[in-house]
Image: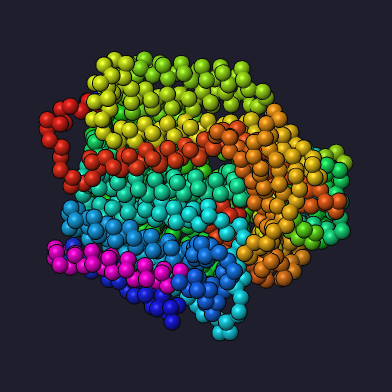
Amino acid sequence: MTRKQRRMTIIGGSLAVLALAAALVLNALRDSIVFFSTPSMVAEKHVAPGKRFRLGGLVQPGSLRRGDNLAVTFEVADGNAKLPVAYKGILPDLFREGQGVVAEGMLDANGVFKADTVLAKHDETYMPKDVADALKKQGHWKDDYGAKPAATTAQGNSQGAVR
Amino acid sequence: MIAESGHYALVLALGLALIQSFVPLIGARLRDPALMNVARSAALAQLLFVGASFTALVMLHVTSDFSVANVYENSHSMKPLIYKITGVWGNHEGSMLLWVSILALFGGLVAIFGNNLPLSLRAHVLAVQAWIASAFYLFILMTSNPFLRIANPPIEGRDLNPVLQDIGLAVHPPMLYLGYVGFSISFSFAIAALIEGGIDAAWARWVRPWTLVAWIFLTLGIAMGSYWAYYELGWGGWWFWDPVENASLMPWLAGTALLHSALVMEKRNALKVWTILLSILTFSLSLLGTFLVRSGVITSVHAFANDPTRGVFILLILCLFIGGSLSLFAGRATALKQGGLFAPISREGALVLNNLLLTVACAVVLFGTLYPLAMEVLADFKMSVGAPFYNLSFVPLFALLLLAVPFGPMLAWKRGDLLGVTQRLLAAGVAGLVAVAIAWGWARGGSALAPLAIGLGIFVIAGAVTDLAERTGLFRLPFAATLHRARGLPRSAWGTAFAHAGLGVALIGIVCETTWNSEYIATMKQNDVAHVAGYDLKLDGLFQRQGPNFREMIAEFNVSRNGEALSTMTPSKRSFTTRGSSTTEAALLTRGASQLYISLGDVTAEGAVAVRIYHKPFVLLIWWGPVLMAFGGMLSLSDRRLRVGAPKPARAKQRLQPAE
């Protein structure tokens, strides 16, 4: 192999790996991105049933019902709209009525949000940022939610999701 | 008084760092050894003062001096002593102080062990270290001073976030920081080489041990953090593709690539420019990680933690160092003499492939981490990039890398024989295929890809064993000769084999856990029995107990299998009164490499408790893998060839060593 051929092999190989990676990323982006919505955004955009998204808002006080076998239903509200949510499983330690919540799942045919994951990336004084921002944008931000942000949730993955 | 001394010591360290930033450079220009040697004493003095400052903060925490804001916000007089100490770095200010302490430690180590470095190289390296240190001292002193006093000291502190009161979190941050910050050494060496305009194989010999040390700690730190998340967060997940985790994974990927490219540079004097670039990128990614974690930018760009100046300040440091070093690289890289080219099928070629796949995989993680941020700023909508994205993009690239791993160490330098290596790897390949077949027949349910992935893991492990067997002449030579050869084999060869086998072990653990994990979620009353994966778990009862700074509710489970009693498991739920928050303490029962896992949910009005029980087959392999990798790293580090300045072994002895 001449010097030029060697160089071309290495450059060609690099380009092939890069192209492969780009193709994989584009393909993954098409299928696996999950968007974030609030109940009013869901109402406005008429999200189709069966499409996965993240729903964020406040748990409507008084809406939490516990059924048999760990089934729970509650409503997520953002001041303008409400959306009923059904979930089966153990709610995170910090799930409370009137507090912020982020749930991941999809709408069913009846317009109920079937959540398979309930995230609680917050502690008692701290709102999930996605929720706080969405509420701020809609003018429903109450200062006391953010008045005392948690002393930094220090290291590493302490902010890991709780499912 | 202690707080003020700590503060003062930190200011003095900043002063020393500033001296260390400039005086050695002037010395190098003037070729004045005395001025260049200032770097050494300044680095040691800096270590002394930062150490004093850090000790002061630890003492404040231990004595629960609530007149200091940092102690008040993160400590409690009833907190156990160990968490009083580890709470020092369980908060923003303290962890930044730990960061600079470790930076100073590495600077001091270079000063102590760098006696055989050329004087001007050492001066430059320590000066670059001091630039980084100065930036972070300024950051701490201006935006995150841990020694601030409160005018009216409260009687009691606000306690540390309960999830951080755990031994895993006590060890995880220092390990991670030793990794992150350790890469600053290879960065400083790279910048020094660019400034001096010269680089050679000796440079790689100096840099590689430092990179290896950082890499070992980072590997252990990431594994530790993952295990902590697994048992502390209460739902058995060990990796979330959370931006904070990605922030530690990216330097690891780049650092792994750097380890391998430095090898090529050391042995073949090639890939010089690329190695320099990787050194810069690895530390830049460490800085980016620090920025992502410390600035609060993660879920929203608009809200910078509780103090916007912090995020902006770190962003400035980030731009200064990444931008500055890359411009220097762009300007000076062409001045470095290019090394020779080599045949694509060779050890060098395999290492280039390794570098390509690792850096591209790293770029994919970077993309996945920053894309949601970019879209939020540019297009104003929110989204998340989670596990499905990485499964479709990162995982295939890594699978490709693992497939190539066994070939690399068996190819010869300069010109390899791919066919010959394939023949020698035949046994490993067969072992992999047998594993696929066994997994296929044995598995009930789960992805069809899982048995293939297990086969890949076995192939990687068997490949590492084959490499050792080939080198020692196992089965070819008499056993005594094999033993003799094994003893003569360089430790780095053993290290390579262990580290590569560790990859395979971790892969098998990951696949088994994600595919054949069984889960049982229900509300249980007293004497209810749960059946999970052949185990019977009977709830004996619920008890209350008072801990030092919490109350806990304990559930006692009796575990049996086929009527034979095995053990008792006691998961609990702790509520911390000071912060009004609770944590779930999972109970783990280890059986071989598999684990039973119980965590508790809420108690219902009738006295039943929600429980989550998992059986996680071979889950421990996920962490044994990284431990093996780190062990391999340590073996390699102890190799005498890496110890610069170690006398060369006598020639006669050398002849006994097998040809590589």
Q: Is residue B601 left or right of residue B224?
A: right
Location of residue B442 with respect to B287 vertically, above or below: above
Q: Is residue B185 left or right of residue B151?
A: left
For the N terminus of chain A, which image quadrant? Answer: top left
Q: Main SS type for the magenta part? A: helix
Q: Is residue B270 left or right of residue B71?
A: left
Q: Residue at x 58, y 71 (%)?
A: B77
Q: Is residue B144 left or right of residue B412?
A: right
Asked if residue B3 is among those painted magenta in the image, a careful observer would answer no
The image quadrant that residue B101 belongs to is bottom left
Which residues are the magenta region?
A: B29-58
The residue nearer to you, when weighing B619 against A32, is B619
Where is residue B572 shown, x and y percent of the image?
68, 52
Q: Residue at x 52, y 43 (%)?
A: B365
Q: Residue at x 25, y 25 (%)?
A: B485
The residue nearer to you, when weighing B266 against B165, is B165
- Looking at this view, name the residue that lies furthest to the front: B564
Location of residue A159 with respect to B398 vertically, above or below: below
Q: Residue at x 38, y 40 (%)?
A: B631
Where is residue A150 shown, x and y percent of the image?
63, 65
Where is residue B315 shown, x and y percent of the image?
48, 62
The image quadrant that residue A129 belongs to is bottom right
- Looking at this view, name the residue that lies furthest to the bottom: B151
Residue B524 visible to the viewer: yes
Q: How many marks?
A: 0
Asked if residue B43 is among those painted magenta in the image, a careful observer would answer yes
